[in-house]
């Protein structure tokens, strides 16, 4: 039997570093400014207390009885705008009541980008929970890089700009189809380690 445990952010003592509105959260690693001709890297955001290792590989995060409410898609690019195939994009969010599954993997899953660097995931629109005012998805993105931890906010949902961690650069523009399903598009930009950065005399020596 699987035991399901729900956790609310308000019940967790450490809710993350308090941040300032308008996209600057103290304690979150800042990305360097883009070089000439480079795309700005996706801003990072707090991980929060509910990340769990071991997420299943799936693009459909719906639970039995759910109707699709949002389809998120886009690409993972490097800072030069080149699509990254095989990048891992890991999503986790609360359910519609603002509760996170801390035992199972409801509303959690990762996908791997295709040859064109594309990802797509279908889910519900998460609920809100105090102290957060914005409905949000947590995301980790990784290729040949450190994992980038961030959050996505959904255009048209209430509370975005009231949220302590809201960053307009993480707002996903959405269209709504005839069934009321939101379609949001967001490209992640992450820096890749280059071969040049990776090679040292020691690593070369170890490659014999
Ligand atoms: Fe959260």
Image (spheres, helix red, strand yellow):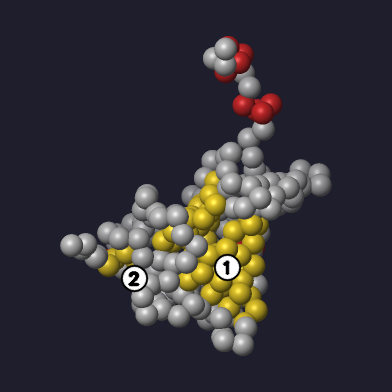
Element type where label 1 sits in the image: strand
**Residue sitting nearer the eye, 28 or 55:** 55
Q: Position of residue 87 (x, y in %)?
A: 58, 48
Q: Nearer the viewer, mark 1 or mark 2?
A: 1
Residue 17 can be seen, yes or no: no
Q: Which label was assigned to residue 33? A: none
Q: Which label was assigned to residue 99? A: 2
Q: Horizontally, is 52 left or right of 138 in the view?
A: left
Where 113 falls versus 136 (above or below)? above
Of callouts 1 and 2, the N-terminal one: 1
Q: Residue at x 64, y 57 (%)?
A: 118
Q: Quadrant of the C terminus?
A: top right
Q: Position of residue 96 (x, y in %)?
A: 39, 77
Local packing at callout 1 (Cα closer than 10 Å; few below 14, some 14-19, many 20+) is many
Quadrant hosting residue 175 = bottom right
Q: Which residue is situated farthest in the right direction here? A: 37
Q: How many tags in the picture? A: 2
Where 117 falls versus 166 (above or below)? above
Local packing at callout 2 (Cα closer than 10 Å; few below 14, some 14-19, many 20+) is some
Q: Residue at x 64, y 67 (%)?
A: 185
Q: Position of residue 142 (x, y in %)?
A: 55, 46
User: Would you name the residue on which mark 1 appears?
Assistant: 72
Q: Position of residue 46 (x, y in %)?
A: 47, 55
Q: Residue at x 54, y 75 (%)?
A: 70
Distance of label 1 from label 2 (alpha carbons): 21 Å
Element type where label 2 sits in the image: loop
Q: Horizontally, is 144 left or right of 10 in the view?
A: right
Q: Residue at x 51, y 69 (%)?
A: 122
**Residue sitting nearer the eye, 192 or 120:** 120
Residue 113 can be seen, yes or no: yes
């Amino acid at each position: 039997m699987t035991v399901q445990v729900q956790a609310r952010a308000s019940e967790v003592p450490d809710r993350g570093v308090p941040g300032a509105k308008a996209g600057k959260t103290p304690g979150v690693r800042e990305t360097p400014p883009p070089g000439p001709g480079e795309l700005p890297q996706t801003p990072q955001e707090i991980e929060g207390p509910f990340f769990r290792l071991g997420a299943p590989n799936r693009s459909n995060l719906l639970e039995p009885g759910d109707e699709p409410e949002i389809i998120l898609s886009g690409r993972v690019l490097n800072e030069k705008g080149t699509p990254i195939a095989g990048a891992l994009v890991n999503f986790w969010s609360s359910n519609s009541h603002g509760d996170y599954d801390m035992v199972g993997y409801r509303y959690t899953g990762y996908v791997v980008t295709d040859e064109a660097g594309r990802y797509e995931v279908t889910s519900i629109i998460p609920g809100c929970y105090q102290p957060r005012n914005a409905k949000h998805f947590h995301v980790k993105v990784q290729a040949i890089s450190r994992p980038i931890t961030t959050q996505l906010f959904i255009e048209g949902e209430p509370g975005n700009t009231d949220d302590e961690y809201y960053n307009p650069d993480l707002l996903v523009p959405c269209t709504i189809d005839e069934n009321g399903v939101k379609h949001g598009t967001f490209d992640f930009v992450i820096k890749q380690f280059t071969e040049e950065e990776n090679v040292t005399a020691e690593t070369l020596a170890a490659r014999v």
